[in-house]
Amino acid sequence: MIKEKLNCILLVDDDESTNFLHRYVVEKTQYAKKCVTVHSGQEALDYLTSTEEGEHPQPDLVFLDINMPAMNGWEFLEHYKQLDKNQQGKVVVVMLTTSINPDDREKSKLFSDVTGFKNKPLTKEMILELIKEHFPEKI
Amino acid sequence: MFKFKKLKNKILTGYGLFLIIIVIQVLLSFYVNKKAEETHNKLTQEVKPKVNLLDRYRNANRVLLLLVNTKVVDANSTLLTNKIKQISEVDFPYFREELNHIKLEKNTASLHHQSIDSIVQNTLYFEQNAKKISDLLVLTNDYKNQKKIEEAKSILTKSATNSTSIDRGLAFLQRHYNKELEEGFTNLSERLDNSSRILLVSTLIFVLLGVFFSLKITYSITKPLKNLMEGAKGITKGKFTSRVSVLGKDEIAELSAIFNQMSISLNRSFNDIKNKNKELEQFTYIASHDLQEPLRTLISFVDLLDKNYNNQFDEFGQKSLDYIKGASIRMSNLVKGLLEYSRIGSSSEITTINCNQLLQDVKSDLTVAIEESNATLIIEELPELKGYETELRLLFQNLISNAIKYSKPNVPPVVRVFAEERKGWTFAVEDNGIGIEKKHLKRIFIIFQRLHHMTEYDGTGIGLAHCNKIAELHKGAIWAKSVPDVGSTFYFNISRKL
């Protein structure tokens, strides 16, 4: 257990079963008060720009799939860059189906918002490690 | 850098040959003219004056004899003395002098020396005798002196002899020089005749030679060029084995050799690509085939679990089982699609296809989808063409079922199929569906690329990749034009040369 829970974790993936599994993992850890899943880049943008009681959700962790129909992960990041600071999430992690290929690593350098790459599936250890790295005060 | 030295030399040799021929001809005719002029000059300046001189000499000789004779016979002819003196003391010495000049010329024959000597001698006698007569008969009284008359008469006889000798000698010389003149002119005209004939013949020979060598040089340039062109044409038609024979040693020969090397390496690369492609297709085929096996096992066992232990799973377990089943079936479809993709065109033959018939078949295959969506399928007059029937049918089926599938909610799809002839046939499948944004128009033809979420429109992302490959198989292309929310038109063309 950690001292203080994260406010929100956002999962962006077009695959229903992946979202189901990842949400299960996140909820099981109880590291976050809220876990939101969306199916596309557009839905993610819609969620980030929405307001709840006058405030944007600003998730602490965003897990982003790259290979999605219509707006893929890279295109999402293009739009994400242009969001207001108070709309963006705190930490964005790119999730990969297979291990990273060199082209993607080169491409990721164009996006300063990307914190790192992780391979699917999402695990408890992975989330804990990210919290230790980016939110040490909550441990 | 290439300087084309040898080729340049070849062409210059051709031009040079003609130039040399012209120069030779000009020199030759110049020489012939010069020679003729020299001979002509010699004849008119040397021989002609001699003949004239001899003429005048003979005349003077005759006149003098006549004068002397008259002098002796006619007592009233005292006045003739001056004329006699003019000839015997001025003209004759001049003629003698001239004859001596002729004698001194190196080409005068010794026979002529004797004649000249005899003429000169006789002339001297004649002069003396004329003087004697003139001195003897000065006054009219002298004619009455019989003795004087007798003496004059005897001198006159001697003079006549002198004159005859002179005339004979001069006639002899005159004959000689006349002959020389005549022969000279005959020779000259003959020689001119000959020269012009030689000029004509040599011109002909040189021109023929020139033409021959120029043709040979031209041929030696054009022949290998022609070979090269044919070789290059062969390669454009995909005959990578075509080679060019290397003729000669010039730059074109070098080019031909380079061309051959290029052709060899092209052929090698082409074979490499062919092999690689084959390997790749083989690999895809085997991989997708082998992947089917474990997938089938997976699906079978999930089915078994679902049927036999259904009530023992809680909600999470049941949902997991559904996801496993869904994913397995999806993967099985993907693998099947991949398998089909790898096999496009690998086992079929080109036949003549009636596209109207083909579209009727497609329509009946899609009956269920058409009825469910309440779609209208308009098929215009289509051509008959050569192609791969099974593949073409799949292509139309994919495009039409896409047109039906991506329709706007609550708007019955209207799909129109038509064809236009321009460099082969271009077909179009037009719909009134949801359309595609311009930025996605290229991406849709890439395998496994999808624009929509599974829950909106299902699919594997293989259909249009299939269509692309089939169009390529027919040496054509596929592309789309679209206005979002209005509709899309998919075009593909089929080459006449398959």
Image (cartoon, grey):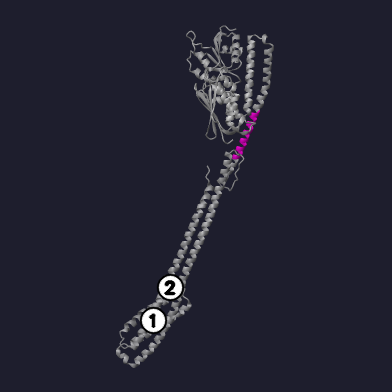
Q: What element carries label 1?
A: helix
Q: Where is residue A135 in the image (x, y as percent from the top left)?
A: 55, 11
Subunit ID for the residue under disc 2: B
Q: Magenta region, mostly helix, strand or loop?
A: helix
Q: Name the residue under label 1.
A: B61
Q: Where is the C terminus of chain B found, in terms of image quarters?
A: top right
User: Going 50% across and 64% down the picture, which residue do you hit?
Assistant: B197
Marks 2 and 1, the one that precedes in the sequence = 2
Q: Is mark 2 on a helix, strand or loop?
A: helix
The amino acid type, in three-letter code, at marker 1 is Asn
> Along the horizontal axis of the image, is B87 left or right of B226?
left
Using a 10 Å C-alpha cutoff, classify the residue at mark 1 as few (fewer than 14 neighbours), some (14 to 19) or many (20 or more). many
Specify the segment rendered in magenta.
Answer: B262-282
The x, y position of residue B148, in whole percent, is 34, 91
Q: B241 and B76: which one is in front?
A: B241
The answer to whether mark 2 and mark 1 are in CB contact below 8 A is: no
Q: Which quadrant of the structure image shows residue A35? A: top right
Name the residue type under label 2: Val
- In the image, is residue B104 above or below residue B366? below
Q: Residue B63: name its quadrant.
A: bottom left
Q: What chain does badge 1 belong to?
A: B
Relative to B313, is B385 above or below?
below
- Residue B330, numbered label: none
Residue B258 visible somewhere in the drawing: no
Q: Mark 2 points at which residue?
A: B47
Name which residue lies at 35% across and 80% down: B87
Q: Is residue B2 located in the magenta-colored stretch of the structure?
A: no
